[in-house]
Image (cartoon, rainbow, N blue to C red):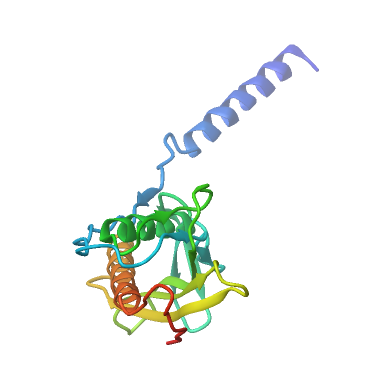
Amino acid sequence: MTLMLRRNALALLCLGWLSACQILPTEITPPTTYALTLPAPEPVAAPALPAVRLGTTTVGAPWDGTALVYQLSDVRFSADAYHRLLSPASTLLNTALADWLGARQRFEAVLTPGTPAPAPWRLETGITALYGDFRPARAPQAVISAQFVVVDTATVPRRRLLVLDLNQRIPLESATPAALVAGYRQGWLRMLEELDTRLASLRPGNASAGHS
C-alpha cells in the first residue's frame, strides 16, 4: 500500500469513528423508580392476637420484577423498562404489609421472614395480578389481586384460620406510570384494611377457618 493510500485509509477510519461518536447518545437516562409506602394506621387499643410470622410475599409472572406492566389489549401486556419499582414487587409489598400490620398492633408481634423469635401464627400472601389496564377506549385502572392465608402453626396438623381472596380495580386519572403506582398504593391499602377487618373476628384458640 502506497503512502497516499495509507493516509486516505486512515482519514476514512477517523471519519467513521467520529460519525459513530455523533450517533451514540452522550447520556443514558436512568429509569424513574417508585416506592410503595403506605400511611400508618391508627393502632388498636390492645393486641388481641398472638405473634404472627410473615411468609415471603409471592408475586406471579410477569409482574414479579421491578418494571411496571401495562395491559395494552386483551392479549398483550408490556413491561416498561424506563419506569420501575425501587425493588421487586414482592419485596415492596411485603415491606408495606409488615410496616402496616406492625403499626396497627392487632398482633402481639409481627415477625418478618428470617426472624428467629417464635410465632404461633403465620401469614402467607400471594399476588396473582399487578398491572395497569391501559387498553384503548377504556378508563385506565390499577389492577391488584391477592390471597391472604393465616395458618395456626402451633397445632398438629396445622390449621388454616383464614383464607381471603381480594381483587381491586382502582380508577386512574390518567394512563401514566405515576398514576398507576398511586393506584397500587390505594389498592394495597384497601386490601390491608379488609384483611384487618377479618382478622378482628379471629380469636386465639377459638378461631374458625374461613374462606372468601
| Quarter of the image with the N terminus in it | top right
In the displayed structure, would residue 3 be above or below residue 190? above
Residue 38 lies, in percent from the top left, at 27, 58
In the image, 134: left or right of 22?
left
Q: Residue at x 47, y 84 (%)?
A: 209
Q: Which image quarter: residue 198?
A: bottom left
The one nearer the camera, 37 or 11, is 37
Frontmost residue, 132 versus 135: 132
Q: Is residue 192 left or right of residue 125?
A: left
Locate the C terminus by quadrant: bottom left
Residue closest to the far top? 3
x, y percent for residue 37:
30, 55
Percent x, y of residue 118: 50, 54
Residue 179: give x, y in percent of width and height.
Answer: 27, 65
- Quadrant of the rendered structure where residue 5 is? top right
Whether residue 149 can be seen here: yes
Identify the residue at image location x=23%, y=57%. 40
* Outermost front residue: 205
Q: What number of labels is visible? A: 0
Camera sees residue 80: no
Quarter of the image holding residue 146? bottom left
Q: Is residue 112 above or below residue 198?
A: above
Q: Residue at x 29, y 77 (%)?
A: 197
Residue at 33% over, 70% down: 192
